[in-house]
Amino acid sequence: MFIKDFKPTQFHLTEVTPQYWKVAFNNPPVNVIGPDMMREMKLLLTELETNTTVNVVVFESADEDFFLAHYDLVADPAIAEALPSPTGYAAWVDILVRMQHLPVVTITAIRGIARGAGSEFLLATDLRFASLEKAILGQMEVGFTALPGGGAAGRLPTLVGRGRTFEILYGGEDFNAEIAEKYGYVNRAIPDKDFAAFVDAYALRVSKWERRVLQEIKEYVNKYTLLPDAEYPLHSDAFWGAATRPEFPSITKQLLDRGLQTRGDLEYNLGREVGTIFPKKD
C-alpha cells in the first residue's frame, strides 16, 4: 500500500482519511526545492495520477516560517533533470504541469514564506489558503536577472490580472497575506488561530463529494483558465538561459555569501534584500 510503503525524506505524508491526504514539506533549514524533493514529488504525483480513492490533498509545511523558500540554488540542476519526466518537460515544469491536471483537488495551506519556485508551486494548485499573520508570497527572480522558470508569468494573470502580475514580477517584492488575498494571489487569508481548523474542515468536506463531479469541475475550470501545457517549457528555457549569463551567478554568489539558504535575516527578508544586490562588474 503506497501510503505505508512510501518513505519520503523531504516531506511527511499523512492519510487523514482514505479520501483526504496531507503533505507537510520538511527540508531544513528553509525548505528549498532541490533534486531530492523533486524526486519524491514525482513519485507522489505518479501515485495520485492513478489512485482512485484520494479526492483531496492538502500541501502544508512542517516549518511555520518557511512554506517553500525557493528553488535550491546550490544543487546541481542536472540531477533533477535526469529524473523521469512523463511530460517530457524540464523537471520543475513536469511537476507543475502534472500537478494542475491531477484527478484530485489540490489545496495549499500557506504558513510561512513561499517565494520563487515555492510561489509557483502553490500557483499550480487548485486552491490557496493563507495564514493572515504568517504567509508571505513573492516572485523575486527579477532580482536574479531571470524570468520565473515554472510558469508564474502564465498562471498569475488569470488570478490577479495583467497589471498586478506585472507588479508582482517587475517588483520582486514580498506580499503579505492581506494583500495577496486582495489581489487574488490566494483564495482567502485566515487568522492563524483559526487557520488549521478552517483548512481541515474545508478539505474534509470536499473529500466527501463524488469523485467524478470533482474531476469534471476541474476539467472545465482548467479548460477556461490554463495556458496550453506546451507554453510552460518556454518559461523554463528562459530561466535557464538567464542562469547561464554572468549576471545570475554573480548575484547568487553574493547572496549565498550573505546567508542565502540558511536560516537568517537574508532568507526572512529576501524580497527586500534582493533589491540591494547587483551583478559585479569585471
Image (cartoon, helix red, strand yellow):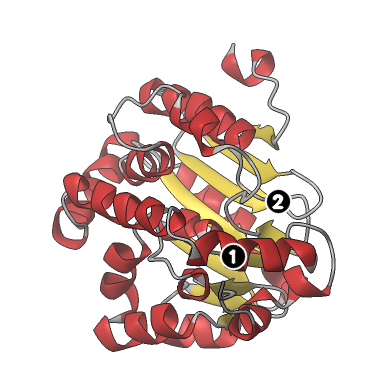
Amino acid found under the numbered disc labelled 2: Asn
- On the image, which quarter does residue 39 sit in? top right
Marks 1/2 in contact by CB < 8 Å: the verdict is no
**Residue 198: image location, x then y, percent:** 63, 64
**Residue in the picture at 28% in, 30% down:** 87
Neighbours of disc 2 within 10 Å: few (<14), some (14-19), many (20+): many
Compare residues 220 and 197 and report the one nearer the observer.
220
Q: Circle 2 sits in a helix, a strand or a loop, which is it?
A: loop
Q: Which residue is mark 2?
A: 31
- Placement of 114 over or under 59, stated as above or below: below
Query: What number of labels is visible?
Result: 2
- Placement of 260 over or under 1, stated as above or below: below
Give residue 250's mark. 1
- On the image, which quarter does residue 245 sit in? bottom left
52 displayed left or right of 255: left
Amino acid found under the numbered disc labelled 1: Ser
Q: Circle 1 sits in a helix, a strand or a loop, which is it?
A: helix
Do we see residue 166 in this rendering?
yes
Q: CA distance from mark 1 to mark 2?
A: 23 Å
**Residue 165: image location, x then y, percent:** 34, 80
Give residue 69's mark. none
- Placement of 95 over or under 196, stated as above or below: above
**Residue in the picture at 38% in, 56% down:** 239
Q: Residue furthest right?
A: 264
Q: Quadrant of the C terminus?
A: bottom right
- Placement of 19 over or under 156, stated as above or below: above
Do we see residue 202 in this rendering?
no
**Residue in the picture at 33% in, 36% down:** 103
